[in-house]
Amino acid sequence: MKLAVSGKGGVGKTLLVSLLSKIFAESGYSVLAIDADPNANLAATLGFPEPEKITPISEMKELIEERTGVQPGKTASFFKLNPKVDDIPEKYALERNGIKLMVMGRMKKGGSGCYCPENALLQALVTHLLLARNEVVILDMEAGIEHLGRATAKAVDKLIIVVEPGRRSVETALRISKLAQDIGLPNIAVVGNKIRSQAEREFLISNLPGFKFLGFIPYDQAIVDADLANLPLLDSSQAIINEVRNIFQALI
Amino acid sequence: MKLAVSGKGGVGKTLLVSLLSKIFAESGYSVLAIDADPNANLAATLGFPEPEKITPISEMKELIEERTGVQPGKTASFFKLNPKVDDIPEKYALERNGIKLMVMGRMKKGGSGCYCPENALLQALVTHLLLARNEVVILDMEAGIEHLGRATAKAVDKLIIVVEPGRRSVETALRISKLAQDIGLPNIAVVGNKIRSQAEREFLISNLPGFKFLGFIPYDQAIVDADLANLPLLDSSQAIINEVRNIFQALI
């Protein structure tokens, strides 16, 4: 199964990707988590030590050119199918607690350009990975909608849009949903996050009619406090973990 | 004065840009607010009716090619200085309550590409605008750090980074600051947002040593409630307005 998690900035994409990765891994799945945001936070949230030392995909250009026969920077439609991409996560991802992690790349220098080549590489990788039944790939997408212009995630089986109770978050979800359909991604589901009340839950349901909700993750001050105290986030809220377990069940 | 507001997704960039625009306008400045985020929310937050009908900069390509002599899509370094760019806001921005608004552009269709050409156009526009003493341009940047790779805002006088009490927001601010210096933008200031306590204020100060703080905007449930009730945001919290007035004073 290939999943991508998208949404407005700050809604909680990285936390959901991290908890889903953890729960899939604990349930016996082989998990490949990919941070597709140049403002990369997934490694830190997953608790990888020294996240800045992970080799990003953007520094594997020669490797991917060798494998796909195409120079990075070209649009993704020119990449040819090549099963040899399959060994890249095995060889180049870091692993911790049963989760393999790759990061698309960090912006190394201001003025050095956009992330189009990296997105093209990532799209090729996600498209060409052949997964066994117990394997799952989870992409943590960049905030907002530009990745949909680039169609980075077009090869995923399901796009999960995270929303929080707020008008801009809902508007972003509607834009993402529309753009996702343009790139042939009709399998879309929504996760509500930071839910404080029944009214907030109903706000999301009534403002996103026709959307399938996988779950509603409660707001929990414990996770905010853990963050400020620089404690690990993933174990800090049992209420949040329980709901992400329900979301995991809904996915499988 | 040319300002750009940056930060992690969800920290409150658009709200700060909107309130600063309002306060500058009320103080007699001529304000040009530019939404540089393809996931555009500024028009709605400023209360412009029918925000989807505003002509985005991305649809002014022929105009800007005519004025700059360069085909859009080329890197911005090829744009030549041309004072005729100066009349573009006058002719093409919408105006409401003394605020002129331009939007960079919306993603119209999934898979249609990245926002590099639009960012190049915007960079040229911001670079070439000649401002009188009582004129101010405020850019609402895309969430995260990619716009710094593109150097979209390199011609601004000051980059304001919005942070909220949270580790990822602080890490993003540090990355933005580093990348901004690469593109020759050393004039950086920080605004703390959603501050609930003295401890949260101190968290930001201690985690961003050496940064100049323009102010600390309090968390106010009133603005969240106004958003959920679909009421105008800008008048919903006197506490927030008061602190943004202080930030305005610190800027001028």
Image (tube, coloured by chain):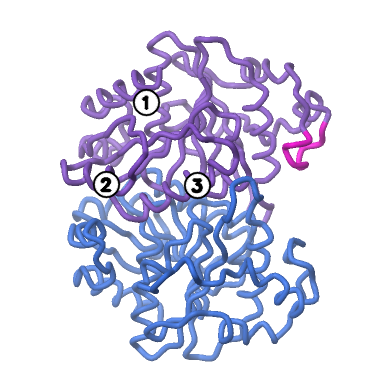
Chain colours: A purple, B blue
Chain identity of mark 3: A
Mark 1 vs mark 2, CA separation in Å:
27 Å
Name the disc covering residue B24, or none. Answer: none
Residue A156 locus on image (x, y percent): 55, 29
Give the class, few, some or many, for how many residues have Cα within 10 Å of label 3's Cα (few <14, many ≥20). some
- Against A110, residue B85 (above or below) is below
Residue with the mark numbered 2: A206
- In the visual, does A20 lie left or right of A51? left
Magenta-span inclusion, residue A94: no
> Relative to the observer, which residue lies in front, B90 or A99?
B90
Q: Tell me what residue is drawn at x 34 percent, y 35 percent.
A: A191
The quarter of the displayed image where residue A70 is located: top right
- Bounds of the magenta segment: A70-78
Which residue occupies 50% across, 67% down? B35
Q: What element carries label 2?
A: helix
Chain identity of mark 2: A
Q: Which mark is residue A19?
A: 1
Disc 3 versus disc 1: distance between alpha carbons? 27 Å
Residue A178 marker: 3
Q: Quick check: can you spot residue B173?
A: yes
Disc on the earlier residue, 3 or 1: 1
Is there one chain holding both mark 2 and mark 3? yes
Type of secondary structure dominating the magenta stretch: loop
The reply to whether callout 2 and callout 3 are in contact (CB within 8 Å) is no
What x and y, as percent, mark residue A176?
A: 48, 46
Q: Which amino acid does label 1 sit on?
A: Leu
The kind of secondary structure element at disc 1 is: helix
Disc 2 to disc 3, C-alpha distance? 18 Å
Front label number (1 vs 2)? 2
